[in-house]
Image: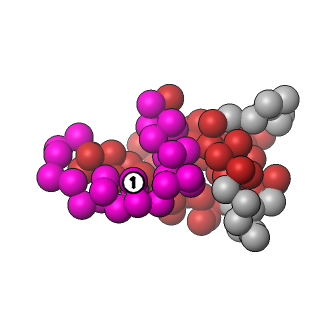
Amino acid sequence: MKRAVLAVTLATAMLSGPSAYGGTIERACLKADRPNATRSLCRCIQRVADATLSGGERSKVAKFFSDPHKSQSTRQSDRRSDEQFWKKYKKFGELVSQNCS
């Protein structure tokens, strides 16, 4: 049941029209100036984030683009909240890989 709800939520987010200004993650992705970071890829990543992460989590992920060390610090943190976030972040990454190639 959880997968079905996630699939519907993700599909809805993926099919919605593009935002005029983009989201936090989309802007961070484009600003990071990585060679493979196309507008459509960054928009797709944002849509997956909108479907799976809270606003605070999206802000945290956006910071990873400009400071990759923050992701390492979060992953290695002993804080329970960081551990829970990291599990959710890994699922987010899997969905990005499946839907944004």
In the image, residue 75 above or below residue 23: below
Q: Nearer the viewer, residue 21 or 10?
A: 21
Q: Nearer the viewer, residue 32 or 78?
A: 32
Q: Quadrant of residue 27?
A: top right
Instruction: Looking at this view, name the residue that lies furthest to the bottom.
Output: 35
Q: Nearer the viewer, residue 31 or 76?
A: 31
- Residue at x 70% of width, y 65% of height: 34
Q: Position of residue 28 (x, y in %)?
A: 65, 46
User: Is residue 47 found left or right of 52 in the rendered image?
Assistant: right
Residues shaded magenta:
56-81
Q: Which amino acid lies under the numbered mark 1 shown in the image of this protein?
A: Lys
Callout 1: 10 Å neighbours few (<14), some, many (20+)? some
User: Is residue 60 found left or right of 78 in the rendered image?
Assistant: right
User: Is residue 41 found left or right of 93 in the rendered image?
Assistant: right
In the rendered image, residue 25 lying in the magenta stretch gets the answer no
The residue indicated by pointer 1 is 70
Q: Position of residue 63 (x, y in %)?
A: 51, 46
In the rendered image, residue 68 lying in the magenta stretch gets the answer yes
Q: Position of residue 85 (x, y in %)?
A: 33, 45
